[in-house]
Amino acid sequence: MKYIITSLALLISASFFAQQRVNAEDILQDIKKGKTINISNATIEGVLDLTYMDEALPKLPKRRNRWWNNGGSNTIEKEIVSKISFVNCTFKDDVLAYIPDEDSGYTFTADFEDDAIFKDCTFERKAMFKYSDFDRNADFSGSKFLDDSTFKYAKFYRDISFKNTQFNEPATFKYSEFNRFISFANAVFKETATFKYTKFKDGVSFNSTQFEEDLNIKYTEVDGEFDIKNMKVAYDIDSKYTDINGKSFNKYLLNR
């Protein structure tokens, strides 16, 4: 009887966490107030627009101006000062730190001044972090990206991990920069993975990483450790002009 009661309690507890729902708009309001976000075992419903585009648009000129062609910028950057932590969460809708708004001609981005944790999460829709700066630690380890995702031009200044991640659609880290060691160990890229022009300034691990289609590391620069033990690439590796500690990719393989 004690075993049955204990099992029932665990079942109820698991059900509670599985059913927890959090509205994205409530999270955005807390971020706007500078509150720390610490959410675990939850389903996030609604678009999490970290650029706050709808709030910024009414304050901007309605039409594209010529001054943009005179050294101005059409990029509107939002600084997220709150510490953000999502662990074992499911995002049912888009998570947006990058929005190119065709109607207004503006591009909206979000930068993270404090920790940005998205650990063991599932992104069921888009996960857009193009141009984002991560000033403090960031962690996407164990997360699944089921739809489009991009970290193109993203800059990671502190500790960062993509260990055990899964990308179901083409994933791009083109032009991204990692100031500290970064691990993609045991990650799975089900479609083409692009690291063209990416800079790894303190080493990178692709240990046991599976690329189920092509891998593009053209013009990629690596300083420090380059761990590709047990890495598997199903199709082609484009390594033209890749620089690994001053050596080409092919010379690196020969000297291992």
Image: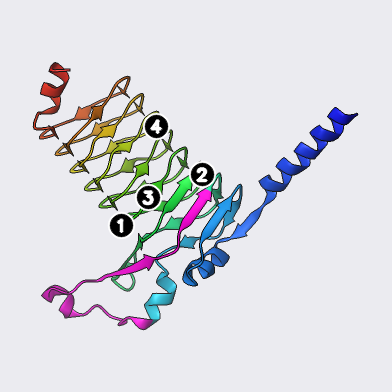
Mark 2–mark 1 distance (CA, rounded to whole Å): 22 Å
How many angstroms separate mark 3 from mark 2 (CA)?
Answer: 20 Å
Looking at the rendering, the stretch of residues picked out in magenta corresponds to 59-86
Residue 137 got which mark? 3
Question: Which amino acid does the dot numbered 3 rest on?
Answer: Asn
Residue 210, image x, y percentages: 36, 26
Residue 132 percent across, percent down from the top left: 32, 57
30 or 102, which is in the foreground?
A: 30
Query: Which marked residue is nearer to the observer: mark 1 or mark 4?
Result: 1
- Which sits earlier in the primary sequence, circle 1 or circle 4? 1
**Residue 122 forms part of the magenta stretch:** no
Per the image, label 4 sits on a secondary structure element best described as loop
Give the x, y percent position of residue 27.
54, 63
Q: How many marks?
A: 4
Position of 212 compared to 35: left or right? left
State the mark number for residue 2.
none
The mark closer to the camera, 2 or 1, is 1
Closer to the camera: disc 3 or disc 1? 3
Q: Determine the CA span between mark 2 and mark 4.
A: 14 Å
Amino acid beneath label 2: Thr
Query: To which residue does mark 4 refer?
Result: 187
Residue at horizontal 23 percent and vertical 29 percent from the top: 226
As drawn, the label of residue 133 is 1
Mark 4 in CB contact with mark 3 (< 8 angstroms): no
Residue kind at label 4, given as amino acid type: Ala
